[in-house]
Image (spheres, grey):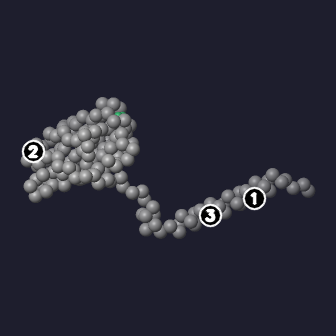
Amino acid sequence: MMKCNRLVDAGRRQFLRGGAMATAGAAVAAISPAQQAQASPALAQIDYPSNRLANVADLAVNEPMDIEYPDADSPGVLLKLGEPVEGGVGPDSDIVAYTVLCPHKGWYLNYNGEDRSFNCPGHFSRFDAEAGGQQIWGHATQNLPQFTLRVDNNGDIFAEGCSDLIFGRPSNVL
Ligand code: FES
């Protein structure tokens, strides 16, 4: 009887593929949770030079104050939200600051005080000011970078870093 070499080859390939899959599965299983945690990508948080932005007494609830940080090419707003929020500082943990350059293509964002969101007139991305700049909707592929703030004993507010890459910069390095 004639043997079909094609079928034999196909069977051999299937056998080898199955062996490779089993080996890969064993390798994945051998990675402990601690090793997986070490393999996680680093956060984009970057420490910039400290810069005084304003005093707590200068702010009114839900009225954004224009700022520039970490330099004059980086517009943003300082915002008192009136209730504790993610990343909020000050006596009420309600003061935050964000870039106003949309992370998608850099259009200037508008602040909507009614729902406390930043809105992009370019392609309509939206970001939640009360949730650390979390993207609500739109073309952007990251949340709105939030400036890291500190308040001293005199109520002076300092920016000292940023949570993510500011639009237009190849890296968060001055
Ligand atoms: Fe803001 Fe495109 S520039 S969504």
Q: CA distance from mark 2 to mark 1?
A: 76 Å
Q: In x, y percent, where is residue 23?
A: 62, 65
What amino acid does circle 2 point to?
A: Asp
Q: In x, y percent, where is residue 31?
A: 50, 67
**Disc 2 packing (10 Å; few <14; some 14–19; many ≥20):** few
Indicate whether 100 appears above or below 149. above
Residue 90's quadrant in the figure? bottom left
- Callout 3–callout 2 Cβ contact below 8 Å: no
In this rendering, the count of numbered labels is 3
What amino acid does circle 1 point to?
A: Arg
Nearest-to-viewer mark from 2 and 1: 2
Q: Quadrant of ligand 1?
A: top left
Q: Earlier in the sequence, mark 3 or mark 1?
A: 1
What amino acid does circle 3 point to?
A: Ala
Indicate whether 139 appears above or below 35. above
Judge by depth and name the residue closer to the eye, 45 or 9.
Answer: 45
Residue 27: image tag = none
**Disc 3 packing (10 Å; few <14; some 14–19; many ≥20):** few
Q: Is residue 139 left or right of residue 53?
A: right
The residue that label 3 is drawn on is 22
Q: CA distance from mark 3 to mark 1?
A: 16 Å
Determine whether the residue tagged by mark 3 lies in a helix, strand or loop: helix
Residue occupying image coordinates x 19% and y 55%: 150
Determine whether the residue tagged by mark 1 lies in a helix, strand or loop: helix
The residue that label 1 is drawn on is 12
Judge by depth and name the residue closer to the eye, 172 or 66.
Answer: 172
Residue 31 in view, yes or no: yes
Residue extending farthest to the right is: 1
- Callout 2–callout 1 Cβ contact below 8 Å: no
Q: Is residue 44 left or right of residue 160?
A: right
The residue that label 2 is drawn on is 58
